[in-house]
Image (cartoon, rainbow, N blue to C red):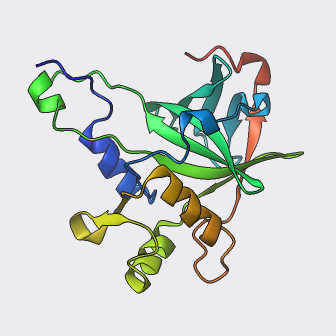
Amino acid sequence: MKTKLKIIAFYLLAVLLGGCVPSVHPLFDANETIFDANLVGQWSDPNSKDLCTLTGLDNKAYKMTYIESNGKIGKFTATLGNIGNDRYLNIFPDDANLPQNDYYKSHLISVNSFMRVKTTNKGLAVQVLNYDNIKKLLERDPFAVKHELMAEDNPLLTASTKELQRFIRKYSSDEIAKIFEKPKQMRRVEPQDANSVK
């Protein structure tokens, strides 16, 4: 049995440990995605040596390469869409080459994550979901969005794409829930080489 590997289990663990909120479904359907050439480029947090590169994929999606300061690389496909007046980037890991057999690979799951993005005159403002606040929200209101609790009560969002959009629309500016972190300002780095990373 030959199964296409979409993501390996440690990605899910990394998402949980990194504070992101994983989702089974993407934030947008294929017909809802848009493309903004202003996102193409190499981006970095001025306080970090990590580097994020976004390149265009047929003007429909982005290839995202994230290089940590220790040299470890993560490759993703990202799609952009609107919810209300805000733009969101849905991120999905690319296939990974593992030595395990296909039977093992067929037991691994795929997850999405998403963030709010806004281009500014200073660069790119990025807001990821606030893991702790979403966890508290779901403890107060388990019906706020469909989810399952994983190990150590870590939430995995299982809501459909439309339900996720309703959730984001309802809570994105909620001052009590505060489901998004404060914006992190990314600056453009070497824009002339933005399309050189594969």
Q: Position of residue 106 (x, y in %)?
A: 17, 31
Residue 145 vertical placement versus 162 (above, below): below
Residue 21 vertical placement versus 92 (above, below): below
Q: Position of residue 133 (x, y in %)?
A: 50, 75
Residue 8 vertical placement versus 151 (above, below): above
Task: Please report the residue visible at 53 percent of the width from the left and 66 percent of the height from the top.
Answer: 130
Q: Quadrant of the N terminus?
A: top left
Q: Residue furthest right?
A: 121
The quadrant where residue 28 appears = top right
Which residue is more in the foreground, 28 or 19? 28
Q: Position of residue 70 (x, y in %)?
A: 46, 36
> How many tags in the picture?
0
Residue 122 vertical placement versus 171 (above, below): above
Task: Please report the residue visible at 57 percent of the width from the left and 69 percent of the height from the top.
Answer: 179
The quadrant where residue 3 appears = top left
Task: Please report the residue visible at 66 percent of the width from the left and 43 percent of the height from the top.
Answer: 81
Q: Quadrant of the C terminus?
A: top right
Task: Please report the residue visible at 33 percent of the width from the left and 40 percent of the height from the top.
Answer: 110
Q: Is residue 63 left or right of residue 108?
A: right
Q: Is residue 82 left or right of residue 143?
A: right
Q: Is residue 122 left or right of residue 152?
A: right
Q: Position of residue 91 (x, y in %)?
A: 51, 40
